[in-house]
Each structure stands twice: as C-alpha cells, then as structure tokens.
Amino acid sequence: MVGISWAVGSILELDAAKIKSDSVRLFIGFAQDRLRLASADPETEFEKDVWDLRVFGTAQAYRMDFTAVTQPWLVVLAKEWACEKVSCPPKRSDAHDLRAERALALARAPRRSGR
C-alpha cells in the first residue's frame, strides 16, 4: 500500500472490497468489525432489526434477524424475549417502557372481525 493515498477520515470509511491485497483486505475488514463492535451498545442494538449478539456479550459472532416479523408489537415482544435469552437486557428508557406496554395492550385488545 505504499504510495497509495486514501482520502478517508477513519478506517471505518475504507471500502475493503476495493483493496487488492487479500491479507490487507482481511485485516481492514477485521479492524472495521472490531471498531464497530467496540462502539456499539445494547440499547442502540435493541432498536435495530438485525442484532449482532456480540454486543450483548455472546462470544460467537451470531446475528439475530427480526425482519421476518411483520407486526410491530410482536417485534417488541420478540426483542424483549431475546434480551432475556442472551442474559444482557439493554438499559430501557421510559419511552421504551411505554412502547412495550402499548404493544402488550394492543396484543391483548379484542380484535375486530374482518381483520
């Protein structure tokens, strides 16, 4: 990479796919992954549709994908359940508690016929 100038402010801005050297590309990908993980927190991860479970303290690089769940109230409940299973629930704000309570209320509400 001597003589190559990259106009980026951070290693996170590099496009690893454009790097020709396999070993350099792998190192950049590894470094980017570790930097993203180091700057992540469970509360922010909770709001995402696809979780990196390492943020919650798991040793493996597993992902949990909630995109297949279409009902918003069920997504909240699935995420709450998943937080308990990974043994590291995120810090919850009052707004989050209100959303969860509303989701439970909607789930318990009688359904109108025709829906």
Image (cartoon, rainbow, N blue to C red):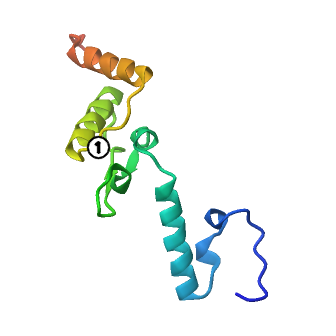
Q: How many marks?
A: 1
Which of 44 and 50 lies nearest the eye of the viewer?
44
Mark 1 Cα-neighbour bin, 10 Å: few <14, some 14–19, many ≥20: some
Q: Is residue 97 above or below residue 18?
A: above
Q: Is residue 61 above or below residue 22?
A: above
**Can see residue 105?**
yes
Q: Residue at x 68, y 63 (%)?
A: 10
Q: Position of residue 25 (x, y in %)?
A: 56, 80
Query: Would you identify the image quadrant in which residue 70 lies?
Result: top left
Q: Position of residue 53 (x, y in %)?
A: 33, 53
**Can see residue 115?**
no
Q: Is residue 75 above or below residue 14?
A: above
Q: Position of residue 8 (x, y in %)?
A: 74, 66
Q: Residue at x 47, y 50 (%)?
A: 40
| Quadrant of the snapshot with the N terminus | bottom right
Q: Position of residue 113 (x, y in %)?
A: 22, 12
| Quadrant of the snapshot with the C terminus | top left
Relative to 2, 33 lies left or right: left
Q: Which amino acid, by three-letter code, is at mark 1?
A: Cys
Query: Would you identify the image quadrant in which residue 61 lies?
Result: bottom left
Q: SS for tag 1?
A: loop
Relative to 52, 15 lies left or right: right
Q: Is residue 70 above or below residue 102?
A: below
Residue bearing the label numbered 1: 88
Query: Would you identify the image quadrant in which residue 6 lies?
Result: bottom right
